[in-house]
Image (cartoon, grey):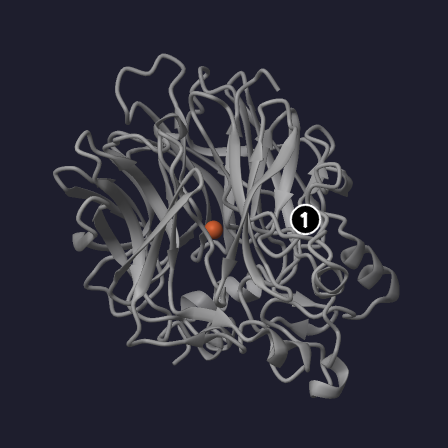
Amino acid sequence: MVNPTLKTFLEATACVTKEHMDHPLELVEGEVPPELKGTLFRNGNGRFVHQGVTYDHFFDGDGMITRFAFRDGQVRYSNRYVRTREFVEEERRGKMLYRSFGTNLPGGWPANALKMQFKNAANTSVVWHGGQLLALWEGGWPHRIDPDTLETIDRYSYEGVLENDFSWLDKQIMREMPFSAHPKEHPDTGVLYNFGTVAGTKQRLVLYRVEPDGQASIEQAIPMDDLVFTHDFILTDSGKIIFCLPPVSFSIWKAFMGLATPVESIRAIQDAPMKIMIVDGDTIRTFETDFFFIFHYANGYETEEGTIIFDAFAMDDFPGAEANVALMAGDDSATPRAPLRRFSVDPATGSVSHHVLTDYPGELPAIDPALNGKPYQYCWAVGGDPKADHKLLDGIVKYEVQTPATEYVSLTPDLPGEPLFIPHPDRQSEDHGWVAYIKFEVATTSTFLEIRDAGSLEMVAKLRLPHNIPPGFHGCWVKPSL
Ligand SMILES: [Fe+2]
């Protein structure tokens, strides 16, 4: 059944065509605090329709970086598509030339068979590290972006570190080793950790380490039985790296033959366990728990007794290709919702337990990055009313994960994006700061940047964008030292 809110949103944001530079945003409510100084970068799909073809998956549209520069109580807005080589070629030729994560080329399997060069959508996140701004996508190399002009500098391999050198055949299957969209910066050392899921003669989970000066290296290449779909991970304060590996994997040969998109090729075995893999240097231990599929973790840490705790939006079902096609047609009824669930792993005994923290479902969680891998109290996310008769997440939720407790602001029927936490420069407590997010407003068919007090969730400022854009996926906050 078509959800009119979703339909309005998809039509209004179908394709962003205009690129702005330093456009002053119109303040329509509240006031931008003068102490809020810095730059909010965000990444997300700039369109759902490309060259006359509607993508079959929410994740497929070309990446568009947005920049919100906060200074002297004003916000200036810029947006620019990432000029991947696929984007440039498709624009030049005026047709869809590349397959995507969830969309094959028109023409069925003959048009897709043996075409393993997928579009690097460059649309999932943006990170500032080692003096570089990188647009990230989990299936390929990052793109370097000029933070001032948002121009694309190049497709970046960290000076060859991301070149697949496992073997000649591996190189033919996947030349560019992916660098996921969820790197984790250790708050004390400044080292950036990340991973890539690499298809080849053997499936591998490759772990990367990037020093604060931007020098990258491969830490480990872990052989895998399957090409498991894993999107995010946890870095603890002591340097342990934790993956949840669901029984959800890609059938690369089906995609290779053009018989399916990568999303359609996914097999989810609902009665099989999810594995929790803990990488501690060269020691790798794996534990099992019930079936879940996780896109995002709020955070994770170790207790003094050595128990590993992590909180995640864990779905008890995998949203398959059909659910995404329906979503793109305005039907959200098959879209899963997940509450925030706490997992506890005792490596000494091997016991794993989990429980729901609160009933409020959410996604796109954000925490104070200074507490990454450490005990923490607060997480903000897009959320939904547990009693709602639809599946869209149309509110902002603040989780207090230790009590636990929830504060919720309904924005129904409007649709917000990731509420990124921005710490107050004179922070007195963990939730002293703001959350900032992009919101599509149904009544006015307009898009806004909204800033709320991270403690109370009260509105601080609302600013109108000069055009409609999808709220996007992930972003980062960069202090004025940029
Ligand atoms: Fe993500």
Q: Position of residue 25 (x, y in %)?
A: 57, 33
Residue 113 is left or right of residue 363, and the answer is right
Residue 397 at x, y = what percent?
Answer: 28, 45
For this orientation, the residue located farthest to the top is 426
Q: Left or right? Give the position of 285 relative to 228.
A: left
Q: How many residues crowd around disc 1 within 10 Å: few (fewer than 14), some, or many (20 or more)? A: many
Please tell me which residue is depicted at 68% across the width and 74% down the height of the picture: 53
For the residue pair 168 and 155, the one nearer the viewer reads as 168
Kind of residue sitting beneath label 1: Trp
Q: Quadrant of residue 360?
A: bottom left
Q: Which residue is mark 1?
A: 141
Q: What residue appears at the point 62 percent right and 52 percent down from the top-left corner?
A: 178
Q: In the depicted view, which residue is nearer to us: 385 or 114?
A: 114
Query: At which x and y percent is residue 50?
Result: 70, 67
Is the C-beta of the residue carrying label 1 under 8 Å from the nearest atom of ligand 1?
no
- Residue reaching furthest to the left: 403
What residue appears at the point 76 percent right and 38 percent down from the top-left corner?
Answer: 151
Q: Is residue 352 above or below residue 37?
A: below
Element at label 1 = loop
Residue extending farthest to the right is 93
Q: Is residue 284 visible?
A: yes
Image quarter of the C terminus: top right
Q: Quadrant of the N terminus?
A: bottom left
Classify 76 as above or below 57.
Answer: above
Q: How many circles with numbers are drawn on the protein?
A: 1
The reply, left or right, for residue 177 in relation to residue 313 is right
Q: Is 207 left, or right, of 454 in this rendering?
A: right
Any part of residue 42 in sight: no
Nearest the eye: 192 or 15:
192
Quadrant location of residue 390? Answer: bottom left
Q: Position of residue 318 (x, y in %)?
A: 38, 70
